[in-house]
Amino acid sequence: METTITAEHGQSGFISLVVIIASLGGLLFGYDTGVIAGANEFLKALFHLTPAQTGLVASSVDLGAMIGVLVAGFLGDRVGRKNALFTAGITFMLSGVVSALAPNVPTLIVGRLIGGIGIGLASLLSPLYIAEIAPPRIRGRLIGSNQLAIVTGIFIRRAVKPRRLGRGYEALTP
């Protein structure tokens, strides 16, 4: 009986860790949802954006997310959920680098489009992976942690407002 409790406790700890890691996709999704709103004024000044360009920069993430969701199921089936989530993480990192180093508007749009693809991948794959590894008795609670991570990301972004950080380049940082 004691080994069963220990094994179950060890498994619960492992599952909790995996769920936290898988939910990071939701956290990034929520954070990115709020980040562009805080950076709009800075981006308008830096790139001399027209209203149409501002809308394109903001909505490029949504377009990327649509693409990501459309390929996520196929990718997850093809390479496995864990590897597909790893791919989502790589796209988030690539997006950050491309966006931060963007010398012009088209490059910034491409960077945000890449980030959107990562968001789309993680949006579909994170709850799916969590559902697959979670014990049936707590599955709903663990899948809910992904949703909690999304709103936590939005909260974090809104709590760290650019006007508190200044009007320069640091306005883009968390």
Image (cartoon, rainbow, N blue to C red):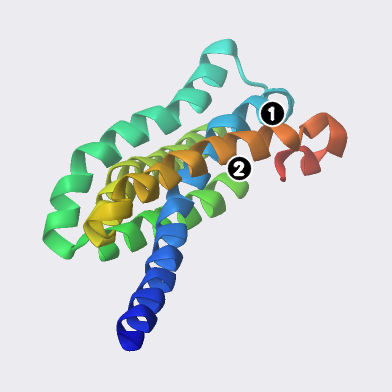
Q: Quadrant of residue 46?
A: top right
Q: Position of residue 44 (x, y in %)?
A: 68, 23
Residue 9 numbered tag: none
**Residue lying at 33% horizontally and 88% vertically, measured from the top left:** 3
Q: Tell me, yes or no, if residue 141 can be seen here.
A: yes
Are there few (<14), some (14-19), or many (20+) residues within 10 Å of tag 2?
A: few
Q: Position of residue 148 (x, y in %)?
A: 49, 40
Q: Residue furthest bottom?
A: 3
Circle 2 residue: 103
Does residue 76 sit above or below 6 in this rendering?
above
Left or right: 90 as drawn, with respect to 77? right
**Residue lying at 35% horizontally and 35% vertically, measured from the top left:** 65
Q: Nearer the viewer, residue 163 or 134?
A: 134
Q: Nearer the viewer, residue 102 or 166?
A: 166
Q: What amino acid is labelled 1 in the image?
A: Gly
Circle 1 residue: 38
Q: Quadrant of the C terminus?
A: top right
Secondary structure of residue under mark 1: helix
Q: Quadrant of the N terminus?
A: bottom left
Task: Tell me which numbered mark, 2 or 1, is placed earlier along the sequence.
Answer: 1
**Residue lying at 13% horizontally and 49% vertically, measured from the top left:** 74
Q: Position of residue 108 (x, y in %)?
A: 53, 38
Q: What amino acid is labelled 2 in the image?
A: Pro
Q: Tell me, yes or no, if residue 47 can be seen here.
A: no
Secondary structure of residue under mark 2: loop
Are there few (<14), some (14-19), or many (20+) residues within 10 Å of tag 1?
A: some
Q: CA distance from mark 2 to mark 1?
A: 20 Å
Q: Position of residue 54 (x, y in %)?
A: 57, 20
Q: Quadrant of residue 137?
A: bottom left
Q: Nearer the viewer, residue 12 or 152?
A: 12
